[in-house]
């Protein structure tokens, strides 16, 4: 049959099919019949008109019918239930060892709090502060030992306590990304505080009273903190113990699994806030049996969902428990460098390249530049000891002055400022080398050859802006950031261009790529501002260690713990907490600079392709040497 005849015979039927598919009311039986008819026509077209447009049309139509047949109502609710009742319990089962480690650690830390309070009755003042202890003693003398829970209105208390508990749980979780140590420090802080608090009431003969009052809400609240610590250990464990995966793959798997466990805790944290605000405040008038029942059922729910139920689900769905975690982590096609891109495509390809080549460029960054940066910070800390022994108002700014030397307090600041310029250029050069040698195995000899060829050129391209920024007063530095897009083209041209006249080309590109470079800079700055909030929150402001910050961030919690431990051994305890801050800031900088380097590189690739057609010329060289569908 001729193709035109075939189309004439079936055109009316296909039109009816399309109308039925576009209708808001679809009958499954009708769609099923349509699917059978269309697939028969498609089979005929594939046999006799395989290279014709009609075959493509029928294939698309069959796909639409197939989707319509298999689409089911209420699918979103089924997915949510499956996520809560199957997916999360399976991840809990896979993470059972980390959750057990968190529980055992917390119990040990609580026991340390009990023992320390037994040895030193004044220890609660160290962990909870003199004000809180004195207030509790006064409440006990007034016959209302837990009157602290009656100090606010119920709604205000619910909002304040719930947000605070969510913040503590999230900090405990996110601390796991700092090598698990951060999570253990927060578990230690909370565990010691709990043990000390409970034993303090025991010394007053009120252990049972405090237990029945506190654990009405504490069953959910404390369990959530412990489980959040376990989720943090899971999340950070992928980076430390990648097994057979790359560290980036392992981190993505573990972070997703830990995040799912963390999200499952949010309802329990909200319930704990409700119980503390609306039930615990009435602990004196509630019958004893009701308190025991609330505590028992709260712990029973936690034990069932996080201990018993996961084993049941794994036995019921053994195939899902054995599913490969990397199903969505398959290697994507390699990014084409020289291609015209819009701003969104530049950002997307920069992120993709960051995760694709991170194992290649992070290895030299963490083996060469991280130790150098820490040595610089240590020496600067010794030189600026007066500042290291002080809690600063905006701590991150003062620490940056010490680390980078742009405070210009003495000659060593200038010397180490120069050292940091070498480190920054070295990081950019390492990232550019990893792109240029994509597809090749990591090799220090290859990296050092690239340094030999490009490092001086890169430094000259970077130095003008760096030293201008270095000597500019703080109130002008933010204005100077808007000139950065002109300079980034200098660095990219120095890194990738093979021709002559690089200086002229760099300034020409800088002028023409100013807008996309500025947009990328704004995106990068916004991203960094968001990412840095957990470790350097903008409202984490305090005059000194004894004062409370406006709102604590993760570093405040960790350094507070360091101070409380170090104060027993030295009068210079602030030095150690500030040193810890500096190390975290340095690691954060070394992890984020490569992303900016990649944004710079892909902005250059896009403009170079527009001006010089480098990628198109390479494609012409390959023309006729590939499969016909690629041509």
Image: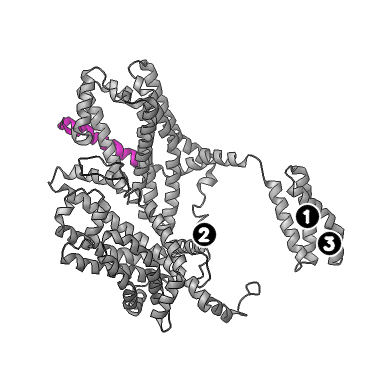
Tag 2 near tag 1, CB within 8 Å: no
Please rate how many residues cluster around mark 2, counting C-alpha atoms within 10 Å: few if below 14, some from 14 to 19, many from 20.
Answer: few
The answer to whether residue 408 is left or right of residue 88 is left
Give the magenta range: 101-124
Residue under circle 2?
A: 330
Main secondary structure type of the part rendered in magenta:
helix
Corner quadrant of residue 144 = top left
Residue under circle 1?
A: 38
* Residue occupying the point 30% across, 61% down: 476
Q: Is residue 558 above or below residue 383?
A: above
* Residue occupying the point 75% across, 61% down: 57
Mark 1 residue element: helix
- Of the two numbered discs 2 and 3 in the rendering, the one whose residue sits closer to the viewer: 3
Q: Position of residue 413 (x, y in %)?
A: 19, 64
Tag 1 near tag 3, CB within 8 Å: no
| Colour mapping used in the image | one colour
């Amino acid at each position: 049959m001729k193709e035109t005849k075939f189309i004439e015979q079936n055109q009316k039927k296909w039109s009816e099919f399309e109308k039925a598919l576009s209708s808001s009311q679809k009958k499954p039986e009708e769609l099923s019949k349509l699917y059978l008819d269309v697939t028969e026509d498609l089979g005929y077209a594939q046999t006799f008109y395989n290279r014709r447009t009609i075959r493509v049309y029928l294939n698309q139509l069959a796909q639409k019918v197939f989707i319509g047949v298999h689409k089911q109502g209420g699918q979103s609710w089924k997915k949510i239930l499956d996520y809560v009742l199957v997916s999360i319990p399976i991840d809990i089962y896979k993470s059972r060892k980390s959750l057990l480690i968190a529980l055992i650690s917390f119990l040990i830390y609580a026991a340390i709090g009990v023992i320390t309070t037994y040895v030193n009755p004044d220890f609660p003042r160290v962990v909870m502060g003199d004000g809180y202890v004195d207030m509790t003693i006064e409440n006990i003398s007034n016959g209302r030992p837990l009157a602290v829970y009656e100090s606010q209105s119920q709604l205000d208390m619910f909002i304040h306590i719930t947000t605070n508990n969510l913040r503590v749980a999230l900090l405990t979780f996110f601390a796991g990304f700092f090598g698990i140590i951060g999570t253990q420090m927060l578990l230690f802080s909370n565990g010691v505080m709990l043990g000390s608090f409970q034993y303090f009431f025991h010394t007053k003969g009120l252990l049972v009273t405090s237990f029945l009052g506190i654990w009405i809400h504490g069953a959910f609240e404390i369990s959530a903190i412990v489980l959040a610590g376990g989720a943090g250990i899971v999340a950070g464990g992928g980076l430390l113990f990648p097994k057979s995966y790359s560290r980036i793959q392992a981190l993505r798997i573990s972070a997703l699994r830990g995040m799912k466990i963390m999200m499952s805790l949010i309802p329990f944290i909200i319930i704990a806030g409700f119980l503390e605000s609306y039930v615990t405040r009435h602990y004196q008038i509630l019958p004893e049996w009701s308190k025991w029942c609330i505590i028992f059922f709260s712990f029973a729910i936690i034990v069932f969902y996080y201990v018993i139920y996961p084993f049941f689900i794994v036995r019921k769905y053994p195939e899902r428990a054995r599913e490969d975690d990397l199903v969505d982590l398959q290697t994507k096609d390699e990014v084409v460098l020289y291609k015209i891109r819009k701003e969104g495509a530049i950002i997307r390809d920069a992120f993709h390249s960051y995760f694709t080549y991170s194992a290649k460029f992070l290895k030299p960054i963490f083996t060469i530049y991280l130790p150098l940066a820490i040595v610089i910070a240590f020496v600067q800390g010794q030189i600026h000891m007066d500042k290291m022994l002080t809690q600063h108002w905006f701590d991150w700014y003062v620490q940056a002055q010490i680390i980078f030397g742009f405070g210009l307090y003495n000659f060593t600041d200038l010397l180490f400022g120069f050292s940091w310029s070498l480190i920054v250029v070295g990081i950019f050069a390492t990232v550019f080398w990893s792109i240029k040698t994509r597809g090749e195995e990591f090799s220090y000899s290859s990296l050092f050859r690239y340094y030999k060829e490009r490092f001086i050129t890169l430094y000259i391209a970077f130095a003008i802006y760096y030293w201008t920024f270095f000597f500019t007063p703080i109130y002008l530095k933010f204005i100077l950031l808007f000139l950065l897009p002109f300079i980034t083209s200098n660095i990219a041209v120095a890194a990738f261009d093979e021709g002559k006249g690089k200086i002229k080309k760099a300034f020409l590109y800088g002028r023409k790529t100013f807008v996309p470079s500025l947009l990328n800079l704004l995106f990068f700055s916004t991203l960094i501002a968001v990412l840095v909030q957990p470790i350097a929150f903008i409202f984490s402001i305090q005059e000194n260690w004894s004062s409370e910050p406006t709102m604590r961030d993760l570093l405040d919690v960790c350094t507070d713990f360091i101070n409380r431990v170090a104060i027993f051994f030295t009068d210079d305890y602030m030095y150690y907490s500030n040193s810890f801050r500096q190390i975290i800031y340095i690691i954060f900088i070394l992890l984020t600079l490569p992303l900016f380097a990649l944004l710079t590189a892909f902005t250059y690739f896009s403009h170079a392709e527009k001006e010089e057609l480098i990628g198109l010329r390479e494609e012409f060289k390959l023309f006729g040497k590939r499969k016909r569908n690629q041509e």
